[in-house]
């Protein structure tokens, strides 16, 4: 039986900006099973990044439940959340979020260190992860000396550190040329098949939508009816 890696229940997020309230996520519920790939679509400002950030325990919901591997993260205090993130979640940010003063290798190494893998073992694993995203020849490059696609692949290598059971990606192919985008998509799909990771991808890329098991549509923070369910 496939287990649920993520359960989201009646999730709401209200931002208070000056005197204005923005309902960014409005009563969203769904599950993600092990090995499942979900694409999240919706116009700009529909709450995609907010939803992904809450699922990744980077942002707290205003109300509702986020259950990761059976753990009720919405009931945990702020200090316990990094542990959940490090143990279960790999996040691929839209803006890469690499450390500019660290090499590609060191950027991945830091992530492994956070996950409890240290020293020579971390260095070796970081190298293997970079090879996996075809950057074995760029390990000592600083982010500023890498192209957009290469930076994205470093951020993917970093997200894969310690084999997370959940991968959350915010428009991972948005800044990539078509060929690099294709290899990133293959990699994400491979993770879902070989490692049984749950992969949730915010995207407009039709190639990702084609390879996903389900597509969720957000509009004004709400999940639209008619969720498209399909078989791979
Ligand atoms: N930190 C924030 N403070 C206030 N409002 C925000 C913040 N982040 C996002 N919003 C608002 O929440 C809504 C959803 O934003 P976002 O999740 O970034 O959407 P998307 O990723 O689909 O473009 C938008 O109206 C946006 O302006
Ligand atoms: Mg966004």
Image (cartoon, helix red, strand yellow):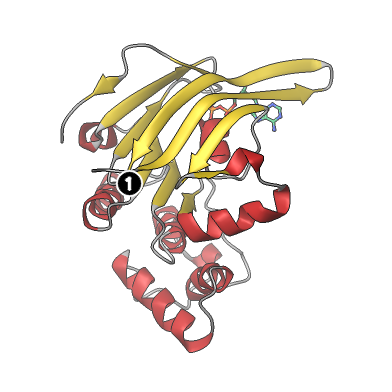
Give the residue pinned by disc 1: 177
- Looking at the image, the residue that sits furthest to the bottom is 120
Q: Nearer the viewer, residue 136 or 219?
A: 219
Image height of 222 relative to 3, above or below: above
- Looking at the image, the residue that sits furthest to the right is 19
Residue 115 relative to residue 128: left or right: right
Residue shown at the point (35%, 45%) measured from the top left: 198
Q: Nearer the viewer, residue 66 or 167?
A: 66
Q: Nearer the viewer, residue 61 or 107?
A: 61
Determine if residue 8 is in view: yes
Determine if residue 49 is in view: no
Residue shown at the point (37%, 47%) measured from the top left: 176
Residue 10 relative to residue 127: left or right: right
The image shows residue 59 at horizontal and vertical percentages of: 64, 40
- Which quarter of the figure is the N terminus placed in? top left
- Looking at the image, the residue that sits furthest to the top is 225
The image shows residue 147 at horizontal and vertical percentages of: 44, 58
Tell me the SS state at disc 1. loop
């Amino acid at each position: 039986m496939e287990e649920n890696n993520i359960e989201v229940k009646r999730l709401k997020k209200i931002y208070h900006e000056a005197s204005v309230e923005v309902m960014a996520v409005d009563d969203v519920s769904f599950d993600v099973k092990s090995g499942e790939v979900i694409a999240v679509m919706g116009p700009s400002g529909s709450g995609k990044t907010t939803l992904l950030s809450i699922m990744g325990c980077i942002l707290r919901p205003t109300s509702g439940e986020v259950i990761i591997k059976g753990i009720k993260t919405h009931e945990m205090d702020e200090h316990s959340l990094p542990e959940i993130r490090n143990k279960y979640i790999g996040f691929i940010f839209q803006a890469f979020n690499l450390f500019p003063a660290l090499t590609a290798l060191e950027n991945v190494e830091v992530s492994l260190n956070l996950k409890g893998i240290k020293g020579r073992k971390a260095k070796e694993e970081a190298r293997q992860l970079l090879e996996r995203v075809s950057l074995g020849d760029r390990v000592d490059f600083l982010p500023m000396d890498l192209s957009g696609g290469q930076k994205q692949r470093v951020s993917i290598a970093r997200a894969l550190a310690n084999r997370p059971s959940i991968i959350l990606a915010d428009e991972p192919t948005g800044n990539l040329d078509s060929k690099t985008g294709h290899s990133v998509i293959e990699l994400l799909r491979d993770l879902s098949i070989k490692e049984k990771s749950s992969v949730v991808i915010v995207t407009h890329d039709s190639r990702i939508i084609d390879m996903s098991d389900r597509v969720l549509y957000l509009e004004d923070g709400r999940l639209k009816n008619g969720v498209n369910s399909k078989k791979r």
